[in-house]
Amino acid sequence: MFYHVKELQYNAKPSQPDPVYAKKLQEILGGQYGEMSVMMQYLFQGWNCRAEGKYRDMILDIATEEIAHVEMIATMIAQLLDGAPAHDQEQGAKDPAVEAVLGGMNPQQAIVSGLGAQPNDSIGYPWTARYTIASGNLLADFRANLNAESQGRLQVCRLYEMTTDPGVRDMLSFLIARDTMHQNQWMAAIEELEETQGAVVPSTFNQKYEKQEVSYSFMNFSEGEDSSTGKWAYGPTLDGQANFEYVQNPKAMGQKPDLQPGPRYIHGTSP
Amino acid sequence: MFYHVKELQYNAKPSQPDPVYAKKLQEILGGQYGEMSVMMQYLFQGWNCRAEGKYRDMILDIATEEIAHVEMIATMIAQLLDGAPAHDQEQGAKDPAVEAVLGGMNPQQAIVSGLGAQPNDSIGYPWTARYTIASGNLLADFRANLNAESQGRLQVCRLYEMTTDPGVRDMLSFLIARDTMHQNQWMAAIEELEETQGAVVPSTFNQKYEKQEVSYSFMNFSEGEDSSTGKWAYGPTLDGQANFEYVQNPKAMGQKPDLQPGPRYIHGTSP
Amino acid sequence: MFYHVKELQYNAKPSQPDPVYAKKLQEILGGQYGEMSVMMQYLFQGWNCRAEGKYRDMILDIATEEIAHVEMIATMIAQLLDGAPAHDQEQGAKDPAVEAVLGGMNPQQAIVSGLGAQPNDSIGYPWTARYTIASGNLLADFRANLNAESQGRLQVCRLYEMTTDPGVRDMLSFLIARDTMHQNQWMAAIEELEETQGAVVPSTFNQKYEKQEVSYSFMNFSEGEDSSTGKWAYGPTLDGQANFEYVQNPKAMGQKPDLQPGPRYIHGTSP
Amino acid sequence: MFYHVKELQYNAKPSQPDPVYAKKLQEILGGQYGEMSVMMQYLFQGWNCRAEGKYRDMILDIATEEIAHVEMIATMIAQLLDGAPAHDQEQGAKDPAVEAVLGGMNPQQAIVSGLGAQPNDSIGYPWTARYTIASGNLLADFRANLNAESQGRLQVCRLYEMTTDPGVRDMLSFLIARDTMHQNQWMAAIEELEETQGAVVPSTFNQKYEKQEVSYSFMNFSEGEDSSTGKWAYGPTLDGQANFEYVQNPKAMGQKPDLQPGPRYIHGTSP
Amino acid sequence: MFYHVKELQYNAKPSQPDPVYAKKLQEILGGQYGEMSVMMQYLFQGWNCRAEGKYRDMILDIATEEIAHVEMIATMIAQLLDGAPAHDQEQGAKDPAVEAVLGGMNPQQAIVSGLGAQPNDSIGYPWTARYTIASGNLLADFRANLNAESQGRLQVCRLYEMTTDPGVRDMLSFLIARDTMHQNQWMAAIEELEETQGAVVPSTFNQKYEKQEVSYSFMNFSEGEDSSTGKWAYGPTLDGQANFEYVQNPKAMGQKPDLQPGPRYIHGTSP
Amino acid sequence: MFYHVKELQYNAKPSQPDPVYAKKLQEILGGQYGEMSVMMQYLFQGWNCRAEGKYRDMILDIATEEIAHVEMIATMIAQLLDGAPAHDQEQGAKDPAVEAVLGGMNPQQAIVSGLGAQPNDSIGYPWTARYTIASGNLLADFRANLNAESQGRLQVCRLYEMTTDPGVRDMLSFLIARDTMHQNQWMAAIEELEETQGAVVPSTFNQKYEKQEVSYSFMNFSEGEDSSTGKWAYGPTLDGQANFEYVQNPKAMGQKPDLQPGPRYIHGTSP
């Protein structure tokens, strides 16, 4: 169950409206790696958690924080949209320059949401649950989370570069700092799990059932060999089980496919 | 540019048809973490790569392999569907047991694709490009890739458990082994990049611009404190810059939002 | 079955082309609350109707009108796009101002539809059937319809404010008037149904099976009590069965979740 | 900002696992009218609210409650999935009856989420933000909310009929009761707004700009006249401004469309 | 503008309910190549038509017929769902065989649409406008239409094979016949256009601007040469301009890509 | 299985960056009729092919070429984005003209993909597998392919007209030429199949089961008769089986629908 506190987790006050930037900022609200994604991903990972209690608690603590991040960004966007666009019935905006700038605004933020934030990304594509994962395997999921926080911080930094508004930058500096923490948090949790479970997900599948002769081979599917010079091509593997092998000319090991004709009632094309 | 080889990378021959399993197997072909996702993700990461040549080469080598994995699974699915469903014009299937089993088949694999594989997942949802990321930042993207190979191997292992067909298991054992390699590969590449760039993405954003007082704080947004007992709550942070701090009762640091009325021509509800 | 009349239900003639406005106008054609949504929603409600004949007839009458509204708006959009964009092979548009204005145009209206209307909204997102509902319960659905006509009229009014073209405004004034009628129509139909069925949907579920101690309680999930001052917090309830109760500090009534470990073959993380 | 309480708002304990029912129950979690929809709809309506403070507070109180409903249903689903499916590596399920029943299970709840709830509906379609609306006009939005609670309660009642598990029914009886309250709540809020603003949304658009001769006409677009016998066809209109008029044979009032040829560089088909 | 006729274009009366078949039949209602697709595709092609009047008229005649086809199938589905599923509060269905068969039913047809048709396909995926095209070039679009009627008739024939219900087959036999006509219709219209415009779309683009040395070459991107034995590999081309050329070993003609580093403020990975 | 060649199939070098054009060019990469669509459509048609070996080989040859086309366009887009947008932390772009032009850029190409191509179309909508078809019936599918190459060439020609950059036009002239070939290729393959199978898909369905009295009738669902003057309305049908018949006033041949009340436990509205 949840309680709401009326104050925001941190300041969300722009120095002035900027409807074009309001459109861009939607990316970190409702985009693939926006705050809605981590909020919903962590909530479901927490609710589905069958592991030790400290994991469930930790995941739901950060999930709860992410709801507050969505709230901050939504509040910021509504203020960036204040008073836009400056068209009205008596005096249609006729200044081509104003028109041009407003051309960069998302029209739905006026027509649909009436100058409010939307659960969409920077091109207006709606948030979808397929952005999230809760697999029941925490090591897999924590890697998903580390990726989400990495992509997320990258996007917030890019948005920081695209504005000079001190109020907007103040809020973004908070989100960037929290993403620093959250990257560290998931790295720490991953380290803890890898120590007990091993590095390959899932660790509970017996490796004798996998085709072990190709478990550690880098296959070079192109004519040059630049790809042989990275850590993935020689030396000990990261799971500590073997050494990488570089296969210069990988060959097909399977059959040439030859499908049977379909039955008559399928009305396909048969030989 | 690409060339095609008519043989498969590895065997894809089921012992017998199984249309219900054909439906499930679609998950690792066209699902969120199926082979189409890694194929397209790696292709775009390679094509967009602005880094050292060895990274581009390595990414495109594995991308090219993934096309072959899609091919193997598609070929397998077509064979699992051989001869299904056993309905025809003269003699409709009337055996309730047959009906029941076929109830578990995906009807589109008969009606739409005529007993062929589809670029969809196990519930028939079509593959979408929003499953992929190519951000231009390789450390971020390699974390995405490590996650994709972790979720992917997990799903293939679960599918391995759901069948006893030796031919299907043979193919899956190959895919599981390659996922072992690919997890190791991305871990190695991540280690290489972290050594030169640092662990927090993006490393090129100057941390003095972030709100540093909250960069390493775990915030406990619930009444209990189980979450204080993991590695994310105390001790040195993984980026080597600080120690984790546990905040027992995080407080709101921002304003109580108070939005201005919208302009008249928006026709919203104002105070 | 349907017949087509070649004339439009009402005028759809712009005074001049305006490709940027053509993009915005797509919202009320193929958007969440555009004419395609009410057209398809009413058609399916009518076709699925198991109630008295007058309801089926009324619903299909309005559905048939809505097809004509889609036709009018599509015709208007095609004309707003006349002659845009002014690029051609011999003389590429080089005037930055023209470029800037055209930057606000939807590129698909040139590249994909060749200066024609699209079944999409103002940001180009395609219409989807998930915008509609036909539940088999008319009181529920008429509430959906009243909402659709309310959101729809609101959006048309906003679009009316964004243009000064007399031809466009003439068409919009017709659509706004019809939405006035349609809001009244659904309010009348709702009133008629509520009189015989009661106000809570579905009225046929015996209330003794619901947890009646919380059927009329407003729960205050935040620290302040502004929410206690509206009609939803005191006085008789709208279904005439009780009085609203204001719960100042709602408490959790359920268990602390404690999930069982998953089976081994699922390869999740267990305690 | 938000805080999490570890206990659920109400009991969510099934008497026994039922993976087929777990699939169906997803509808009210991640479906078009599931709890995720009202949760996100109310959150955005609250965050974007530019009206009187009591509305914002009320909306966010109910939004916060809805997060707890998602939590309850997710927890229930995870338990309904306990131990399913009963396949494993040593002993594949071979009993056709078991196979048949499991054919009704959603395969992603095993393969993807490892026996956890998903942010999807009962056929596995992912939740999308296009299910929600926050328009900035509260009367419009409260009608959306009343519809959502009507469709929602209808679906929960249908699901109640589809199970006999006392634990599941106990939880559903709570959700049904809360939906009774929430329908009453939005009806009360609508009544309050209509009293001050009038019944037609948006009330701030001057009706002199609409085509008033068709503002109150029911148009009969079919040959019979059953549709003339409802309250929408005669008597005073619900906004109190006029009487309904029944138009037996509505005629086209607009032009026969005649589009100009497109420019040469569009390469369309011209006359 | 449109008028509705209360009778269906043709019979739509099943001999008995069959909820599992009702699910499958959705494919030709709301699937990629269902009747909704041709209905919307033809409506938009007609409304956007800038060519000779006879084309617009013809396209809208067939579009209007397609609305009636959607109506027939929707009516059929509602009747196939009559009385399903046989669960109720007093007596839950406990017969495993009944359960098993019902496992093949789409749960949304009970929970969401209350035994009514849905604008979705046979796996419940919602119809989307991206299934349609209206490009402004009639030759291109008539090829799209010929494809749609080919895929459509194929799917109806497959569904015909999956039932023995005489009432269902009666309706399908009508739809199959109309698809025979519609394939012939589009072939005739294509022949007419090709005679005046030539066979390659768009015919108005001057071929001197294309890279003519590869305009008629079949490129063999694999090791074997089976592909050299079809009509596409030798002899005169279908546009009458040249002869096909078979290129046994196509070579790369372009550069090895070498992208510039991104700017600093993008925070990507640079060499 | 596949091999990668590091050189592009043809040149992809723009004369200068142009981020606004980069957005538009996405249409033929990840749009409905972009290169990703034909690549995936042909791959699945080839992998699912149950017909003569030469068809499978031919389809996979062209599929393999299409991967190279995606590669060329992706490479072009990355270069068109070089150095955009010109914002940075020290000196925010303040020039309104620059702002205006950049308003036409897709913000995700900076924020999400860091100046790289995306698997999306020109408005940023992600590529979806529902753009493709592989039905198992080659005549149907080759018609789909002919349509795809027709729409594709049309779009590339339109994009050619929208730029004057010689490098971009060079690449497009190659793609246009290949689309000339591919239209000819599918026309040749269609001719070959029609000669042996007949023109109506599927040819294996016995026409005696279709409602033959309407198999060749054009139905005029509107008041005028312009539609009677095309080749689809008189003379021999294209399948050589009959003559077209023109039905001036098509009448309803089916029942007036009258649905039964739903069962009580569905809680719908009954008569």
Image (spheres, coloured by chain):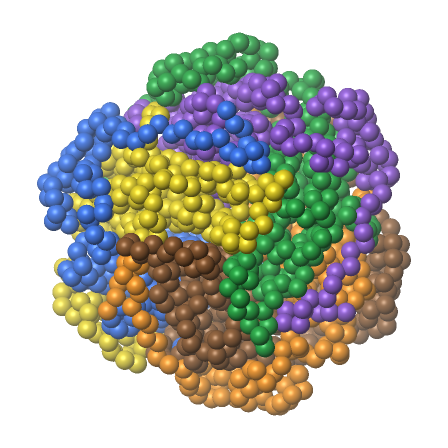
Chain colours: A purple, B green, C blue, D yellow, E brown, F orange
Residue E213 makes an appearance in the image: yes
Q: Residue at x 34, y 54 (%)?
A: E92
Would residue B63 be found to the left or right of residue C79 on screen?
Answer: right
Residue at 36% over, 67% down: E82
In this view, the residue farthest toward the right is E248
Residue F117 percent across, percent down from the top left: 65, 42
Q: Residue at x 14, y 60 (%)?
A: C195
Quadrant assignment, res B81: bottom right
Of residues F139 and A168, the one nearer the viewer is F139
* Viewer-side residue, A117 vs B261: A117
- Can I make out residue F151 in this image? no
Is D20 drawn above or below residue A63 in the view shown?
below
Q: Measuring 65% from the left and 24% from the top, which residue is drawn there?
A: A199
Tell me: residue E134, above or below residue B168: below
Q: Nearer the viewer, residue D88 or D61?
A: D88
- Badge count: 0
Q: Which quadrant is home to the C terminus of chain A?
A: bottom right
- Relative vertical location of residue D89 with respect to residue A202 in this rendering, above or below: below
Q: Where is residue B228? Give x, y as percent.
A: 45, 14
In the drawing, does residue C30 fall left or right of residue A191?
left
Residue E54 on image: x %, y % = 54, 80
In front here: C11 or F56?
A: F56
Where on the picture, by quarter, is residue A223?
A: top right
In the picture, which quadrant includes the N terminus of chain A?
A: top left
From the top left corner, tell me how far across and down residue C132 is, in percent.
38, 57
